Amino acid sequence: MIAVAEPSEGRGAGAALLRAAEEWTRAQGYGTLTLNVFEGNQRARRAYEREGFCVETLKYVKHLALALFFLLGGVTSAQQPSLFNSTGRLTALDQAPGGNPDCIGSERCVPPPN
């Protein structure tokens, strides 16, 4: 994981970390260095592209209410009413386009047509 503290953003710290990761990767004999970034993190994506990274694959995800239910440890609306809206739907899904929490803040995720 590479992270740059906010006060250091825009000062080359991220680029230096990427170069160090690349050097280490080469020294270990690996031929490929990969990373993951959230689609909406445009600043990081531009930095990665400046360092020679390119998009190779796109990952689409859809979190289903049942999966979220289990992630929450089987929480029910009776136990945690603040997590659910008036219809029993998880409120996290109401905040995301298309009911996908990964799409919060993303311009590319749009709700499906009715």
Image (cartoon, helix red, strand yellow):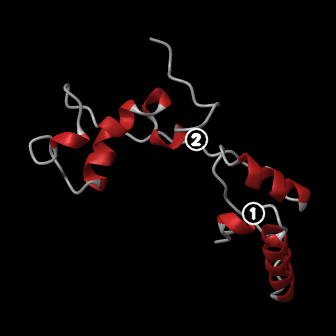
| 21 left or right of 95 in image | right
Residue 73 screen position, x and y as percent: 22, 57
Label 2 secondary element: loop
Quarter of the image where one finds residue 101:
top left
Which residue is the extreme one toward the left? Answer: 78
Question: Height in image: 2 above or below 48?
Answer: below
From the viewer's side, name the closer residue of 31 and 92.
Answer: 92
Could you tell whether 16 is left or right of 62 in the image? Answer: right
> Residue 66 sits in which quadrant?
top left
Residue shown at 18% from the left, 50% from the top: 75
Q: Are circles 2 and 1 on residues that touch, CB within 8 Å?
A: no
Q: Is residue 52 left or right of residue 37?
A: right
Q: Is residue 56 visible?
A: no
* Residue assigned mark 2: 60
Q: Is residue 86 visible?
A: yes
Q: Look at the image and tell me in which quarter the C terminus lies.
A: top left
The x and y percentages for residue 20 are 83, 80
